Amino acid sequence: MATNSKEAQDRAEASFKRKEQRARDGAEAMAEYEAAGVALRKKTARLKALRLAKEGAELEAQVKWPAPGLDDTCLS
């Protein structure tokens, strides 16, 4: 009888430890997932800023100021 209760207790403890380990693994995986999402959003924002800066520079380069045929006197 003592053997059955000892074995049952050992099985219960093993089951509990497995469940604890799964919970820790799940929490770690969720933290990694969230960190990857934050990194992705930061990277996207950085690339968007670079793209907008490039587009702004290209647009500025297209605009000729003063326009051909105008002199500095008409700018005042």
Image (spheres, helix red, strand yellow):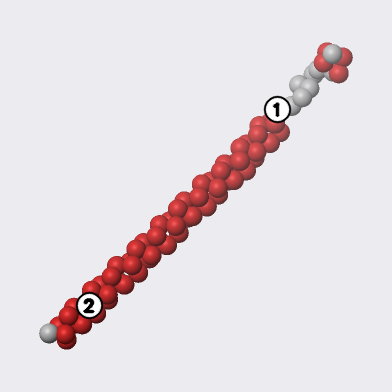
In the picture, measured across the screen, residue 21 lies left or right of residue 54, that is left
Whether residue 14 is visible: yes
Residue ID for mark 1? 63
Residue 31's place in the image compared with 2, above or below, is: above
The residue closer to the viewer here, 33 or 21, is 21
> Which residue is rendered at x = 61% and y = 37% of the image?
52
Count every numbered label the image shows and give the total: 2
Residue ID for mark 2? 9
Query: Residue 46 at what x, y percent from top left?
Result: 59, 45
Which kind of residue does numbered mark 2 sit on?
Gln
In the picture, measured across the screen, residue 51 lies left or right of residue 13, that is right
Query: Residue 70 at what x, y percent from top left?
Result: 81, 17
Residue 62's place in the image compared with 51, above or below, is: above
Instruction: Name the mark nearer the viewer: 1 or 2.
Output: 2
* Other residues around mark 2 within 10 Å, as few (<14) / some (14–19) / many (≥20): few
Query: Residue 68 at what x, y percent from top left?
Result: 77, 22
Q: Secondary structure at mark 2?
A: helix
The residue closer to the viewer here, 64 or 49, is 49
Which kind of residue does numbered mark 1 sit on?
Val
> Which residue is rendered at x = 62% and y = 43% of the image?
50
Quadrant of the snapshot with the N terminus:
bottom left
Residue 34's place in the image compared with 20, above or below, is: above
* Other residues around mark 1 within 10 Å, as few (<14) / some (14–19) / many (≥20): few
